[in-house]
Amino acid sequence: MQLSIIVPTYNEAPNVAELVRRVADAVRGMDAEVIFVDDSTDATPDVIAEVAASSTLPVRLIHRDEAVGGLGGAVVEGMKAAACDICIVMDGDLQHPPEEIPALFGRFGVEDADVVVASRYMERGSAKGLADRTRVWVSKLSTLLTRAMFPIRLRGISDPMTGFFLVDRTRIDLAGLRPRGFKILLEILARKSLRVVEIPFQFADRFAGESKASVRQGINFLVQLTGLRFGKMSLFAAIGALGAVLNLVIMWALIQLGMNYIPAAIIGAEVTIIGNFVLQERFVFQDMTGEASGVWSRFAKSFTFNNVEAIVRIPVIALLVNTWHISSVIAAGITLAVAFVVRFMFHSLIVYAP
Ligand code: GDD
Ligand code: MN
């Protein structure tokens, strides 16, 4: 067999027959199978069994009584059960056009890659099937955040959270995956350094039914992210915290020596910014300095960013206090938290960019 196509399904009864019909058309002439890994509570498994009986393409059904790991867990289970090492993962609602299967497979053959990603976010791709505006922004922002957190592993990958991809299961550590909900590709890409190529595709509208994405999936995703990437971001945070303490100590010492508190605060802040930069270079981004611009250019970007951030925060605090009527301490806390995330993204994606 040449190809196993894995389709996780949760209550997709009205989509299954059309999906199998279009997949069968797309892979005509190839030796392929479809594996549904189903956690449905509706009639989906019966429909799959019916479709399987009349389809020329081999169709298998794995029905799980306990949806361990959700969508991602289903995908891993499908990959374990596949007859073939080359697996394509796609959704069961036809948002992933089956007609792209030959392109994914063909690209794999040409490039000898470990993973071929079907991307919504590269040229000639499109995410227009994302149901609403909020979803589009959540998707774009979480993609940006994720790429900032894994700047090396995800370098050059425009859509690390797509649900449509090809993977050679012998090149990944299936047993080491800890799937948790929707972002199974991220789990695969973040755990091991792989050769990845992308092709564009147009994320279509759902054929029938509604998305199973939810706030709970969003929380799953954040937990997955921190679990995968406790490294860089937490070190960055620890250095930031150390810097804050250093800042206050310097300020206190200078005031003790008789200096006015304003210059003392400025000197404290600037020394901290420089100290943080040195520590970041050494402990957080040390593996990225080789390919990035020279150290003085990195310093200039980092130094400028931190000063602009410090200045911009002041009117933002005033704005929050005046418009939302929250206490100034809470407003300052909010700006510090947001500034931390933005600062991390800026350093990861811009200061240390290759
Ligand atoms: N077995 C199983 N178990 N399948 C599930 C589960 C589950 O708990 N939850 C969802 N699925 C199936 C759905 O039935 C569908 O076939 C597929 O997974 C995708 O679910 P959708 O509900 O259609 O997700 P979406 O369209 O909102 O999200 C898609 O795009 C995201 C990126 O924006 C998916 O491809 C996501 O994986 C992707 O991250
Ligand atoms: Mn969908």
Image (tube, rainbow, N blue to C red):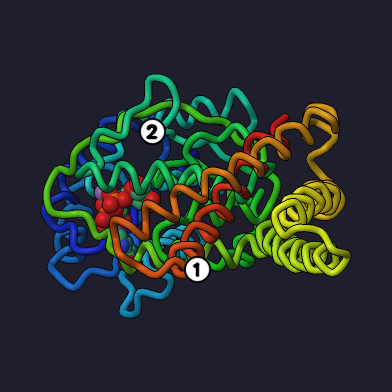
Q: Position of residue 334 (x, y in %)?
A: 46, 62
Instruction: Judge from the rendering whether residue 237 lies leftward or rightward of residue 326; answer left or right.
Output: right
Viewed as shown, does residue 236 lie left or right of 291? left
Instruction: Please say if 87 is above or below 72.
Output: above
Residue 40 is situated, as x and y percent measured from the top left of the image, at 23, 69
Near-viewer residue (332 or 318): 318
Asked if the residue at tag 1 contacts the one at tag 2, i.e. Cβ–Cβ closer than 8 Å, the answer is: no
Q: Which residue is mark 2?
A: 120
Q: Residue furthest top?
A: 124
Does the beta carbon at disc 2 come under 8 Å from ligand 1?
A: yes
Query: In the image, is 113 to the left or to the right of 9?
Result: right
Alpha carbon of mark 2 to alpha carbon of mark 1: how far?
A: 24 Å
Task: Tell me, yes or no, if residue 61 can be seen here.
Answer: no
Write the residue at 61% across / 36% down: 196
Q: Amino acid at mark 1?
A: Val
Q: Compared to 102, does 349 lie above or below? A: below
For the residue labelled by badge 1, is the local secondary structure a helix, a strand or a loop?
helix
> What crowding class fits label 1: few (fewer than 14 Cα within 10 Å), some (14-19), or many (20 or more)?
few
**Residue in view at x 16 percent, y 47 percent:** 17
- Corner quadrant of residue 97: top left
Q: Please give the name of the residue rendered at 57% of the width and 65% of the height, measured from the top-left corner.
A: 226
Give whichever of 144, 41 is nearer the camera.
Answer: 144
Q: Is residue 223 left or right of residue 245?
A: left
- Residue 230 x %, y %: 66, 65
Residue shown at the point (40%, 41%) measured from the top left: 140
The quarter of the displayed image where residue 211 is located: bottom left
Give the class, few, some or many, for how many residues have Cα within 10 Å of label 2's Cα (few <14, many ≥20): many
Amino acid tagged 2: Arg
Residue labelled with disc 1? 223
Pick out the residue farthest to the bottom. 66
Q: Quadrant of residue 177?
A: bottom right
